Image (tube, coloured by chain):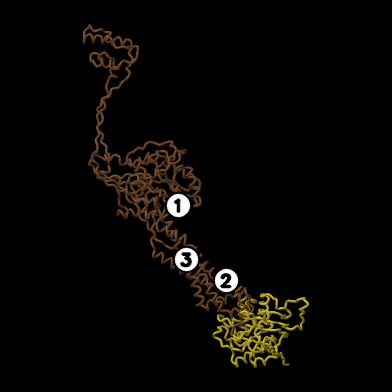
Chain colours: A brown, B yellow
């Protein structure tokens, strides 16, 4: 093939040329490694920031939002129950009505009712003037649905686990129960009804007649004709003129003659007088409202949920014991630092003291909530017994995501099914710009840099071969074939490639480490994630941030694959240089060893 | 010689000459100008001869040596080496002939500057001997033979001109060739080294019977051979043998 010792000696004893060529390759390879590293870093940052689903062990999120289009009326829609935080009865059968498709106007109305019911009557918090602090929990745009949907989803093929969760907006209101702003008096009217009197028996009629005749005789004298005043009809039926009956009946003497049934029908209905105090415009009081978000975790499932145990940065997870969990909460680091909260501190929510057992740092998503309760706790706190508004689905295999998502859509008509892929599209900011840039230019840049490095190595080899004309001619003269000479040169440049690869990996590692050390910040803006509960603010006319902005530090991770690619790139550069040099050498005639030389 | 041709043209016998050239020409075209380096050479060289090629610069000595050394092929005419025609042979066959049958010695020594004396000798055996150890062993043997046993690991730059040319002799002998072709071998040597070199070459000739073909300007070198061929303008003007 070739002489290894010759190649080794060539590299060793022409160390200057070897190093110059190798460093040319190494610079190219190092730069390419840096480019790949940055590109990887952007991917990592994106995964970290933009793929909350994957990061929380979830591949698919199932929610139910207000559908923009109206469709056929759903089969079962109950009236909202109202009350505090009462999204509970909101819309009973979102998922139970299998035939029904997307959310219709009545669903939307139910949702609006659920979100607004909390502020209908602050007077319910106590007499006017009472100071109050109350937290209201509203489902936002994410309509709750019976948690049996979770079971339905978990039965779908490819789904390994489905966890139900609640993600709610919380309104923290403090103030004074307002004075009544409007008093409406009702009642006091007398209502007279026109009714058909009971039919008298012949005996009753005879008795009544004689009684009346006696009364008339007593009142008006016997001269009066009896027939003239006798009520007509009698047993023959037919409605008596009310006026006539009333006229007679209004006389107390005659009244006595009436049967008890007739007396009862004669009674007037008196509506009792009452006063209704109605709060017409509650927010105009001194009530102060702040908003935060709450969500649930399943204490028994630490690997799948809106936050997972891996995101716990301090403290412990919510207890598996429901009794203990009842007074435990997790708080995000961001909310904790904003409010100056620490682990083991207590937070009072609706007169219940909750102990902060841990701080979590969830991934950037529209679903970052400030406080996490256990699911059952939050369900009772928000009157959402056995209801959830998100199902977090894990699948066995990444490639099952799209098929499982389709199956879920089929199983739960009208559900909004989000996958990581669909989430990533909803993100903007310098990270996604950089990512886009890296996608668009990174590959091309890497290719250009590599080609430049190959070209440099090739030219250096070419010049080196040209200087070795006599040497190569001598080799040909002493019986080396053209192929052997070319192989020998390629062995040498391959050796240079190996050196260039090793040095280049070193350069690339240094570039990556420097980038990691500087760690330029990239902003991530995640907008309009349907998963978030923040959209409730638009219903309530509250000002909350609709998008989440996060800064992610760029790193340039060095992966084994990158190192391999860099090394192979350097080897390829060596081979290309060798091919160029070899082509030059092969063109030399052996006679050149003798000719053209002094 | 493994080639036993049955063609009428080549009928190798034990008495066949090592070289047989008939009407050999070689033209070079450079920048539209054609130079007739050789114009019809007829020549036969027997095995074991010692031949000096003489003539002024540009007389065609080097061109003739290239043809004899299978480094080049003629523009026209016929050239036979050990009964094998060389003029239409492939590069591969010519390479094999150079490797197996011919040893070269150049005026500039043409040693590989990055290789030691023994490695320079060993490199010539690479096409025929795959074992590095065997190559080095043979190289050391040959270098000892030419009196450089104490210089085995030296790079050419650390050797004198005379020593470098002796390394070149050892390299030329590496594959036990039938012929040694030397182009102005003493051109870069002082007279003492030149004499030493020629003495060594003649010793080798005597011990192995190798054919020597030496192009030279040096009267001392030329007079040490038994046959002197004089060239001028690409043609042989005299060819004399001494008994």
Q: Which residue is the site of mark 1?
A: A420
- Under circle 1, the secondary element is helix
Q: Chain of mark 1?
A: A
Sooner in the amino-acid sequence: mark 2 or mark 1 = 1
Q: Which residue is the site of mark 3?
A: A33
Q: In the displayed orientation, state which residue is furthest to the top.
A: A223
Asked if residue B134 can be seen in this view, the reply is: no
Provide residue A374's location: percent of width, then percent of height: 37, 47
Q: Chain of mark 3?
A: A
State yes or no: discs 1 and 3 in contact (Cβ < 8 Å): no
- A102 left or right, relative to A354: right
- A507 left or right, relative to A87: right
Q: CA distance from mark 2 to mark 3?
A: 24 Å
Q: Residue at x 30, y 40 (%)?
A: A120
Sooner in the amino-acid sequence: mark 1 or mark 3 = 3
Is the same chain shared between marks 2 and 1? yes
- A424 left or right, relative to A293: right
Q: CA distance from mark 1 to mark 3?
A: 28 Å
Provide residue A140's location: percent of width, then percent of height: 36, 45
Q: Which of A425 and A352 lies nearest the eye of the viewer?
A: A425
Sooner in the amino-acid sequence: mark 2 or mark 3 = 3
Q: Select label 2 or label 1 by which is in front.
A: 2
Quadrant location of the C terminus of chain A in the rendered image:
bottom right
Any mark on residue A579, and which? 2
Asked if residue A513 can be seen in this view, the reply is: yes
Is the same chain shared between marks 2 and 3? yes
Is the same chain shared between marks 1 and 3? yes
């Amino acid at each position: 093939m070739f002489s290894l010792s010759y190649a080794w000696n060539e590299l060793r004893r022409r160390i200057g040329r070897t190093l110059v060529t190798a460093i040319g390759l190494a610079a190219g390879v190092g730069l390419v490694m840096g480019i790949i590293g940055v590109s990887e870093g952007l991917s990592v940052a994106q995964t970290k920031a933009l793929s909350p689903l994957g990061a929380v062990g979830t591949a698919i999120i199932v929610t139910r939002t207000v559908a923009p289009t109206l469709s056929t009326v759903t089969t079962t829609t109950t009236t909202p129950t109202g009350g505090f935080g009462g999204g509970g009865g909101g819309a009973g059968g979102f998922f139970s009505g299998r035939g029904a498709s997307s959310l219709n106007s009545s669903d939307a109305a139910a949702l609006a009712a659920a979100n607004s019911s909390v502020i209908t009557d602050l007077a319910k918090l106590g007499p006017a003037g009472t100071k109050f602090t109350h937290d209201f929990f509203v489902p936002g745009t994410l309509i709750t649905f019976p948690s049996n949907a979770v079971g339905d989803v978990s039965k779908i093929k490819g789904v390994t686990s489905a966890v139900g969760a609640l993600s709610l907006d919380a309104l923290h209101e403090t103030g004074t129960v307002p004075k009544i702003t409007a008093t409406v008096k009702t009642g006091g009217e007398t209502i007279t009804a026109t009714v058909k009197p009971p039919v008298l028996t012949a005996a009753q009629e005879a008795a009544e007649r004689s009684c009346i005749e006696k009364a008339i005789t007593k009142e008006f004298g016997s001269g009066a004709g009896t027939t003239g005043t006798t009520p007509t009809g009698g047993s023959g039926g037919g409605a008596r003129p009310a006026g006539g009956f009333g006229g007679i009946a209004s006389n107390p003497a005659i009244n006595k003659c009436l049967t008890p049934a007739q007396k009862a029908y004669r009674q007037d209905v008196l509506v009792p007088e009452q006063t209704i105090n109605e709060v017409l415009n509650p927010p105009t009081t001194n009530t102060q409202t702040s908003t935060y978000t709450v969500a649930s975790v399943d204490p028994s499932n630490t690997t799948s949920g809106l936050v997972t145990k891996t995101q716990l940065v301090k403290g412990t997870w919510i207890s598996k014991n429901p009794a203990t969990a009842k007074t435990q909460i997790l708080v995000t680091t961001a909310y904790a630092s904003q409010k100056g909260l620490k682990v083991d501190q207590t937070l009072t929510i609706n007169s219940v003291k909750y102990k902060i057992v841990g701080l979590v740092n969830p991934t950037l998503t529209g679903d970052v909530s400030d406080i996490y309760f256990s699911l059952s706790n939050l369900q009772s706190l928000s009157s959402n017994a056995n209801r959830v508004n998100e199902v977090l689905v894990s699948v066995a295999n990444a490639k099952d995501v799209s098929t499982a998502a389709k199956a879920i859509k089929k199983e739960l008509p009208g559900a909004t099914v989000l996958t990581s892929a669909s989430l990533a599209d909803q993100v903007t900011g310098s990270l996604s710009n950089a990512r886009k840039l890296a996608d668009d230019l990174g590959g091309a840049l890497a290719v250009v840099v590599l080609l430049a490095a190959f070209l440099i190595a090739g030219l250096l080899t070419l010049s080196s071969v040209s200087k070795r004309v006599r040497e190569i001619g001598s080799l040909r003269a002493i019986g080396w074939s053209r192929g052997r000479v070319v192989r020998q040169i390629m062995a040498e440049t391959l050796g240079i490639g190996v050196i260039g690869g090793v040095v280049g990996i070193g350069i690339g590692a240094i570039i990556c480490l420097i980038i990691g050390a500087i760690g330029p910040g990239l902003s991530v803006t995640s907008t309009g994630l349907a998963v978030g509960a923040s959209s409730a603010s638009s219903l309530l006319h509250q000002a909350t941030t609709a998008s989440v902005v996060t800064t992610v530090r760029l790193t340039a991770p060095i992966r084994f694959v990158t190192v391999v690619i860099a090394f192979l790139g350097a080897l390829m550069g060596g081979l290309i240089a060798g091919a160029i040099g070899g082509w030059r050498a092969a063109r030399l005639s052996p006679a050149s060893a003798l000719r053209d030389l002094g | 010689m493994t080639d036993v041709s049955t063609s009428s043209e080549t009928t190798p016998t034990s008495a066949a000459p090592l070289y047989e050239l008939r009407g050999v020409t070689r033209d070079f075209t450079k920048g539209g100008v054609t130079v007739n380096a050789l114009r019809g050479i007829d020549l036969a060289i027997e095995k074991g001869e010692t031949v000096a090629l003489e003539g002024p610069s540009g007389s065609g000595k080097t061109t003739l040596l290239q043809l004899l050394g299978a480094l080049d092929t003629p523009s026209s005419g016929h050239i036979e080496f050990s009964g094998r025609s060389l003029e239409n042979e492939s590069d591969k066959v010519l390479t094999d002939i150079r490797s197996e049958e011919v040893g070269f010695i150049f005026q500039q020594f043409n040693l590989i500057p990055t290789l030691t004396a023994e490695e320079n000798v060993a490199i010539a055996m690479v096409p025929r001997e795959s074992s590095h150890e065997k190559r080095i062993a043979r190289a050391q043997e040959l270098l000892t033979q030419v009196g450089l046993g104490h210089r085995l690991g030296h790079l050419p730059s650390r050797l004198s001109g005379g020593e470098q040319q002796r390394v070149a002799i050892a390299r030329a002998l590496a594959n036990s060739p039938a012929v040694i072709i030397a182009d102005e071998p003493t051109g870069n040597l002082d007279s003492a080294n030149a004499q030493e070199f020629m003495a060594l070459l003649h010793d080798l000739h005597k011990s192995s019977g190798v054919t020597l073909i030496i192009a030279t300007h040096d009267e001392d070198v030329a007079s040490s051979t038994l046959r002197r061929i004089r060239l001028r303008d690409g043609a042989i003007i005299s060819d004399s043998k001494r008994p």
